[in-house]
Image (spheres, helix red, strand yellow):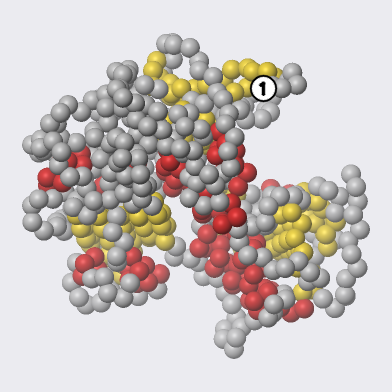
Amino acid sequence: MTSYQEPDRDPGRRRIVVIGGGMAGARLVQQLTALGGGAPAGGADVTVIGEEPHGPYNRVLLADVLAGRYGPEVIALPVPAPGASVRHLTGVRAVRIDRDARLVLCDDGRRVPYDALVLATGSNPVLPPLRGLFEPDGGELPSGVHPFRTLDDCRELAEAARPGVRAVVIGGGLLGVSAARALARRGAQVVLAQQGEHLMERQLDADASGMLRRHLEALGVEVHTECRVRGLRTRSVTRDGGSSAREVTAVELADGFRLDAEIVVLACGVRPRTGLALAAGLTVARGIVVDDELRTGDPRIHAIGDCAEHGGTVYGLAGAAQEQADVLARVLTGATAGGPAPRYRGTRALTRLSLPAWPGPSPAGDGGNGAAATGRTARVREAAAGTDSGSGTAAGPVAALPPVPAPAADGKASASRPDSRRPEPRAVPAGAATPAAVAAAAAAAPGTTASGPRPGSSGAPAGPAAASGAAPEAGLAPEAGAGAGAGAAAGPLDLAAFGETTPAPGDDVIHLSDATRGAYRKVVVRGDRLVGGILLGDLGTVGALARTWEGDEPLPSAPLLHLLTHDGGC
C-alpha cells in the first residue's frame, strides 16, 4: 500500500474531516462555507473523504434519472471550489479511525489528521436473506441483480432496462414504487412484489395505497402484495475472457411459483453504515448514537445523516440530514447569531413523492409492459414449467429514454397465478366495470364524502357495473388491460405523508375522498394538535398542513373539516 504524506498546514487552522461525500456531507461543507463568507468559518481546513468517484448528488432524484427525466448532471449538488481550505478526496474509502492519534486511515494509504471528525457515512441497501443471492462462500451478486442506492446503480439499471426486458422489483416501499415506475417508463415489463399488505405501508393507509396501486397498474406495472420472495434462480454463464459467472433467471415465491426475470431490483430498505464507528469503539445502537450537538461519546467526533441516531430515532430522510448539517455547522464554528447555543431537537419530516405525467403512448402492451387485454401474468408460472430464459444487455445513456414500444396487435392468453389471497388477474370483458370506471360512476353522486373513500377507490369493484367507456379518475390513466393502449397518457400522481397516520384511541380522523379528481386526504388530530396526515392526488393543502404540523402549533378554532378544504396560505 502506498503511503501519502499529508501537506503541511498552518498550525493555527482547525482541521475538520468529513467522512462521506453524500448529501449530508455536502450540506455541512456548504453551510461551513456560507458561515465563513466563502471559506470555511473559523479559519478551518476541511477535507471530505468520499467513497464514490462522483461529486455529491441529490439521491432523492435517482428514480427520475433512471426514468430518463433528468440527466446525472442535473442532480449534482453544488460544492465549493477546491482550494487551500476545502479539498475533496473522491473514490477514497476510509478504513479505520485512530482516535488516540486523531487520524483517519484510507484505503489508498492516506493518513488524514483531524481536530474534529464528522461521520456522514450514510446507509447501505439491505440485502435480504434470499436463497441464491450469494454463493455459500459469499462472492458477488448474480448478474442482473441490482440494489438501487447510488448513481452507479442507476447507470447499470438504465443500461439493462431495454424495452421488453422482464424486471422484478422486490419491496413496495417508497424506493420500490419509484424504481418500478421508472423501469416501466423505460419500457420494461415490471412486477412489483411487496411482502406487506399494501404499498408504502409505513407512510400510507390501505385506501391511499389502493389509489397508488391503481396508478402503477395503469402504467402496466403488475403489483403483488402479501407476496413473500423466497429466493432467486440463477444459471452459470461464461463471460468474455473465459471466466464464469451467475446470472439471474427467475424470482421464486414462497408459495412455489416463480416470476421469470432478467433484472431484479432489491428495494428492501437501508441500514445505517456504522462499521467505522463500531470499530473505533463509539456507541452504536441502530445508528451512531449522538446528543443534541450531534456529538458521539468522543467529543471530537460527530455524526449526521442516515448513519446517525438521535433520541432513539434514525431518520434516514434528506430533510433530517440537512437540518442536522445546519446545526452541526454552527456547533463546529461556534456561530450563534446572538441567540442560544445551537442544538438539534429532532426533525418533523414530511415524505413527499411526485410522479409526473407521461405524455404520449402508454407503455402498456406486449411490447412494452406486458399488459395485454387478456391479463398481465404471462411471467408468473409454476417452478416446474417451461425453461429458464436468458438475459441480455443494451447500452444507453442514462439520460436518454428508449422509444416506447407500440402495443401488440392482439393479446395472447396467459397463465394466471392462482392465489387465494387476492383476485386472480383476468381479462376485462366488454361492458364490465373496471375500478376506474366504477369510481367515475360513483363520482356522479353530488359532492365529496367526509366519512371515507368512495366505493371502489381501493381498486375493488363495488356496486353495479358501470357503462363501458366511462371516464377514468382524474390523474389516473385507464388500467392496462382495460382500455390502456397506444396514445394513452399516464396522469400525474403526487402524495405527501407525515406524522402518525394510524389514529390512537380518542383521536379525531377526517377523511375526504374525491374520485372525480383522484384525490384522497386524511388527517389525524389529537386534542388541539395535528399529529399526522396523508394527501394523495391533490396537494393543494399540503403547505398549510405541513407548516401546522412541523411547528406543532395549536389548531385554529375553525371546524376540523376546514383543514382539508381551505387552500389559502399554501
Residue at image point 60% right, 55% down: 73
Q: Which residue is mark 1?
A: 245
Front-most of residues 98 and 53: 53
Q: Which secondary structure lies at badge 1?
A: strand
Residue at image point 11% right, 38% down: 466
Q: Is residue 448 above or below residue 429?
A: below
562 left or right of 183?
left
Q: Is residue 16 above or below residue 223?
A: below
Front-most of residues 562 and 99: 562
Residue at image point 52% right, 26% down: 262
Find residue 144 and report its horizontal and vertical position in percent. 57, 29
| Circle 1: residue type | Ala
Name which quarter of the figure residue 206 lies in: top left
344 left or right of 96?
left
Residue at image point 68% right, 28% down: 139
Name which quarter of the figure residue 322 lies in: bottom right
Find residue 468 and report its horizontal and vertical position in percent. 13, 36
Find residue 311 and report its horizontal and vertical position in percent. 53, 62
For the C terminus, the quadrant is: bottom left
For the N terminus, the quadrant is: top right
Q: Dot 1 surroundings within 10 Å: few (below 14), some, or many (20 or more)?
A: some
Find residue 120 and report its horizontal and vertical position in percent. 65, 58
Q: Is residue 534 above or below residue 540?
A: above
Q: Is residue 467 above or below residue 286?
A: above
Q: Is residue 223 visible?
A: no
Q: Looking at this rendering, what residue extends furthest in the bottom direction? A: 338
Q: Is residue 397 visible?
A: yes
434 left or right of 283?
left
Q: How many marks?
A: 1
Name which quarter of the figure residue 459 lies in: top left
